[in-house]
Amino acid sequence: MVRANGAVSLRELARVVQTSEVTVRRDVRALEAEGLLDRRHGGAVLPGGFSREPGYPQKTHLSAAEKSAIADLAASLVEEGDQVVVGAGTTAQELARRLARVPGLTVVTNSLLVAQALAHANRVEVVMTGGTLRGSNYALVGSGAEQSLQGLRVTKAFISGSGLTAERGLSTANMLSASVDRALVQSAAEVIVLADHTKLGADGMFQTVATETITRLVTDEHATADDATARELDALADCGVQIDLAPLGGPGADAPVHGTGSGPVHQTQPGPLARRQAPPPGGAPLPGQRRPGAHGGPVGPGGMPVRLAELGMQRGR
């Protein structure tokens, strides 16, 4: 699986071989000792130091539940009438499906998958960059894509990559994709990174967005289940990145946990999209919507939010 995909999470390995993550983690250590793969936070990659980018068919099956939860939370950050940039990737595609319901929205993208997801949203305007098609992820890259973004100004940019570290920021395995992603974020007042827990601590060959440029990280709650990824989150928060943890379990899950960008983490009220939508009959929330009354999370003495490490969450080893 690692050879085919370039990277794989421990949870995915455990699911495929129908065993526990503890057993998979032990086997991965043994394979690393033989030089057959490299361990990464929450998963494994091909040996060689940098993660290799899997193709689109493989990406669609990696961390699918986590990507869906991240897309739900990210969609709640978008307001009616916003102008946003959405980059390429399967998580961005999930986000686009949820943005189709936001009226008056303008979406600029270099992704054919994002554009396709919004093609029939009659209240959303889609603007595509020019460029050369990169078939492995259905994205437009090259000088044509970069030039079409010159002079653009939007409120938010949603972008993902191959890896994210506090030291180096967001990175990817492809030089052309990295160059276009840099052009995308330069147009935005707020840069929001979408990255599931398997990408935390991983490092791609080409830097996309420096840590100090990232406004916000939306990741999944499994990022707190491992000491290494939790430390990476704390380091990112210390660098000024706001941390949002998307709950898994689908509609009706607990409220997302948000970090303030100065180290501590707390829970806040749902975003504009969640407030704007009325729940369907039966009280079940729509995708991206949180149940009312599930907020007001952990705070420390004097009303100050507590650090991620102090949340008391169970972390796996």
Image: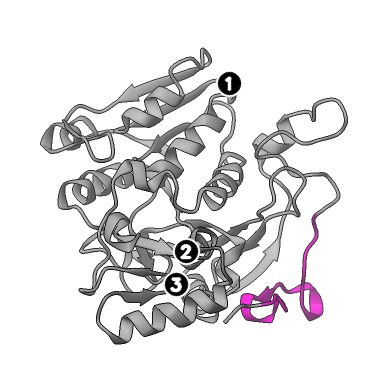
Quadrant location of residue 188?
A: top left
Mark 3: which secondary structure?
loop
| Residue 156 appears in the figure | no
The x, y position of residue 4, in whole percent, is 29, 55
Kindly identify which residue carries mark 2. 13
Q: Residue at x 31, y 76 (%)?
A: 38
Q: Between tags 1 and 2, which lies in front?
A: 2
- Using residue 13 as the reference point, say whether residue 270 is left or right of it: right
Report how far apart the C-alphas of labels 1 and 2 lie in the structure.
40 Å
Find residue 103 and name its label.
1
Magenta residues, start to end: 295-314
In terms of sequence position, does the residue under pointer 1 or pointer 2 come before the other? 2
Dot 3 surroundings within 10 Å: few (below 14), some, or many (20 or more)?
A: some
Chosen colour scheme = one colour
Classify residue 56 by image quadrant. Answer: top left
Say what amino acid the circle numbered 2 marks: Leu
For the residue pair 130 and 174, the one nearer the viewer reads as 174
**First in residue order: circle 1 vs circle 3:** 1
Q: Which residue is mark 3?
A: 239
Q: Position of residue 61 (x, y in %)?
A: 45, 47
Mark 3–mark 2 distance (CA, rounded to whole Å): 32 Å
Q: Which disc, if any, is residue 206?
A: none
Residue 145 percent across, percent down from the top left: 19, 33
Q: In the image, is residue 126 above or below residue 274?
A: above
Q: Earlier in the sequence, mark 3 or mark 2?
A: 2
Residue at coordinates 54% horizontally, 66% vertically from top-left?
261
